[in-house]
Image (cartoon, helix red, strand yellow):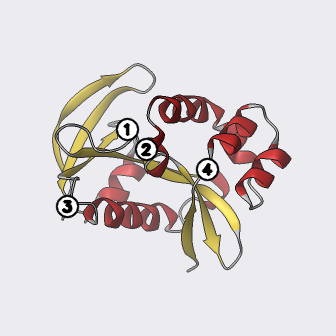
């Protein structure tokens, strides 16, 4: 299986993705990006606002995920932001449809958990998953998450909330 790496998306890259300009986004990122990232522009608007409010968020939020050695973008992953006041970060990752069911989501999650575990400010990692999203439930299985409740998300509706102690 290919390995993955994360490519941080700068504000200039995010702005170009928002504008639908894949060439400019790729140039700003220093790597050819995928049309899939333009389809996710709702997310880049949120993340660009996050960085404007807190420049340190850029180190935590969604990054492009590149499969090596092919060099293709297979999705994106990161956190909703830096650790909150309790040291909790919420993990988020998406695999482009044509690359699903190849193990990339588990690789992304493992790498993101290693990132969280390596930061002494992080006490726990949270995951929010729609009850009908069996694929995402399978991805987090075996990583130490336990269901701690439910929440209502304005975009996704009912979500199960899972938590995993960092470290």
Mark carried by residue 9: 4
Q: Residue at x 25, y 38 (%)?
A: 84
**In screen coordinates, is 27 left or right of 58?**
right
Secondary-structure class at tag 3: loop
First in residue order: circle 2 vs circle 1: 2
Q: Residues within 10 Å of mark 1 (few under 14, many from 20)?
A: few
Which numbered disc, 2 or 1, marks the residue closer to the eye? 2
How far apart are labels 4 and 2 at the CA level?
13 Å
First in residue order: circle 4 vs circle 2: 4
The percent position of residue 167, horizontal first and vertical second, equals 18, 65
Q: Residues within 10 Å of mark 4 (few under 14, many from 20)?
A: many
Which numbered disc, 4 or 3, marks the residue closer to the eye? 4
Q: Residue at x 55, y 52 (%)?
A: 63
How far apart are labels 4 and 3 at the CA level?
29 Å
How far apart are labels 2 and 1 at the CA level?
34 Å
Residue under label 1: 132
Q: Tags 4 and 3 in contact by the CB under 8 Å rule?
A: no
First in residue order: circle 3 vs circle 1: 1
First in residue order: circle 2 vs circle 3: 2
Which numbered disc, 3 or 1, marks the residue closer to the eye? 3
Residue under label 2: 56
**In screen coordinates, is 31 left or right of 152?**
right
**In screen coordinates, is 72 left or right of 88?**
right
Residue under label 3: 144
Secondary-structure class at tag 2: helix
Secondary-structure class at tag 1: loop
The percent position of residue 41, horizontal first and vertical second, equals 65, 34
Choose between 75 and 6: the one closer to the eye: 6
């Amino acid at each position: 299986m290919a390995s993955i790496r994360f490519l941080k998306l700068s504000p200039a890259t995010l702005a170009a993705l928002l504008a639908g300009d894949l060439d400019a986004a790729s140039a700003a990122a220093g790597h050819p990006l995928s049309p899939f990232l333009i389809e996710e522009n709702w997310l880049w608007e949120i993340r660009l606002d996050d960085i404007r409010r807190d420049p340190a968020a850029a180190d935590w939020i969604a990054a492009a995920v590149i499969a090596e050695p092919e060099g293709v973008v297979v999705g994106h992953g990161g956190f909703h932001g830096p650790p909150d006041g309790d040291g909790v970060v919420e993990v988020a990752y998406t695999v482009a449809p044509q690359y699903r069911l190849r193990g990339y989501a588990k690789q992304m999650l493992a790498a993101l958990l290693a990132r969280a575990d390596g930061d002494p400010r992080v006490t726990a990692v949270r995951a929010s998953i729609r009850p009908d999203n069996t694929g995402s439930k399978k991805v987090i299985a075996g990583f130490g998450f336990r269901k701690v409740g439910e929440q209502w998300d304005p975009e996704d509706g009912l979500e199960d909330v899972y938590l995993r102690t960092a470290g």
